Amino acid sequence: MDRLTTDILVVGSGPAGSTVAKYAAEKGVQVTFIERRHEVGVPVRCGEFLPDVDEIRTMFPLADDLEGTFDLPSEMKLVETDRIRLVNPKNKATDIPMNGYTIDRDRYDQYLADEAIRSGATLIKDCLFKNIDGNKAITTQGEIEYKVIIGADGPGSRVARSLGLQRNHRPYPAVTAQAKGDFDPIVVMYFGGIAPGAYSWIIPKKGQANVGVGFSPKFADGTLSEYFDKFAKKNNFDIITKIEGKHVPSEGPIPKTVSGNGMVVGDAAGHVISVNGGGIPLARIAGRICGNIAADNIVSGRPLQDYEVEWRRVMEKPLKTAAFNKKLADTFAFSGPEWMVTMCMGILGKRRMNNLIRCKRIFP
Ligand SMILES: Cc1cc2nc3c(=O)[nH]c(=O)nc-3n(C[C@H](O)[C@H](O)[C@H](O)COP(=O)(O)OP(=O)(O)OC[C@H]3O[C@@H](n4cnc5c(N)ncnc54)[C@H](O)[C@@H]3O)c2cc1C
């Protein structure tokens, strides 16, 4: 490929990019999505847990067509879970009801990319976006001329930077690997010195579990791999894959997600629940809105600014509440010794921890 033209160029084939590409292509416009990796979804850098559609609805009741957006063949759901167990530093567990399931994230991303391709979008792999020059994207495979560009290129978005948009501040590093064995069908999160400022997790899959650690560098006194090793040793994990890491946006949405004929979506836009790092549902809800509006822009001149208005209407309040709750946790629980985490979890109790996880206010 030396030179290509397209109506809509989407950078990234994660959940956000493939969802944008699918919904835009369904409206009959020309959509190209590019991916720097050789294989979509590989390597996996994710906890691989998704809340089910009714849970997503309780968090984002204004989102349209959640059933359609999150429709997934049942064989892709590995283990169904009905609660999240929050464990304090003294090993006291509190179970919060939460229906969900686990996935193989590589297969999940590949499924979403295939759906976009089936809808008419063209995927180019091994293609790294570098910069924008006028209405052309400069990539490692040549120039791509576009009418609308969408950055779905993750937390360190180069597209956001090229569009003059703010990038995520202070994203948290997190690492993950697969551990062999039989695990209870419960998502477990451990808080305290084991993962300062965030949590470590065990998320059950078939015959194995996704295990990982996220932390806030400002509260930690070692490297993330040291924390991971400690967690793995403590639980006697039989780690069967390479440890993979990535950053997680931690401060909620960026101030502006549209600039000229460009938009950003998913992690690139800070569409992540700050208190737990969950981002796949948001990438898909915002991706659907973004794809529809980008296509309407091509077909009938609908302003791209509508995207900014619409995703904020649907997602901004819960995301800002989660970001606020995360700040409270940083200030009152994570900034001091471990007993403060124990004390704060005690004060919150089950009801408020339930609110916390569901992006709701914890105090009136
Ligand atoms: C360790 C960890 C565990 C997590 N666990 C969960 C979980 O259990 N559940 C959950 O809901 N969320 C989880 N998240 C968050 C979730 O993974 C993200 O919110 C989600 O992947 C966001 O999707 P996205 O499409 O915006 O970005 P990404 O999934 O990051 O996709 C971006 C894509 O763009 C490509 N790309 C980047 N730059 C370029 C470029 N310059 N040119 C071309 N392509 C490019 C990347 O290769 C990638 O494929 C976790 C995150 C981490 C780090």
Image: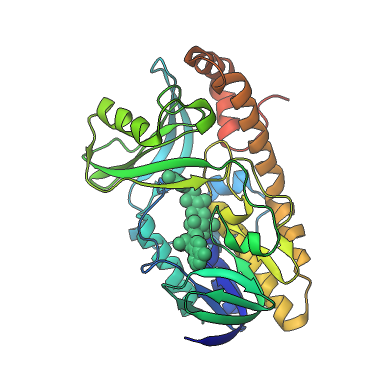
**Residue 148 location, x and y as percent?**
67, 75
Pick whichever, 344 or 34, lies toward us.
Answer: 34
Q: Is residue 78 above or below residue 191?
A: below
Q: Can I make out residue 18 in this image?
A: no
Seen at 56% across and 59% down, the residue is 284
Q: Is residue 196 above or below residue 64?
A: above
Q: Is residue 287 above or below residue 328?
A: below
Indicate the quadrant where residue 302 lies: bottom right
- Mark count: 0
Seen at 25% across and 28% down, the residue is 233
Q: Can I make out residue 20 in this image?
A: yes
Left of 342 or right of it: where is 356?
A: right
Pick whichever, 265 or 73, lies toward us.
Answer: 265
**Residue 335 location, x and y as percent?**
57, 21
Quarter of the image that includes the C terminus: top right
Left of 316 or right of it: where is 157?
A: left
Pick whichever, 85 or 198, lies toward us.
Answer: 198
Seen at 37% across and 38% down, the residue is 212
**Residue 283 location, x and y as percent?**
56, 56
Q: How is the image coloured?
A: rainbow
Indicate the quadrant where residue 17 lies: bottom right
**Residue 228 location, x and y as percent?**
34, 34
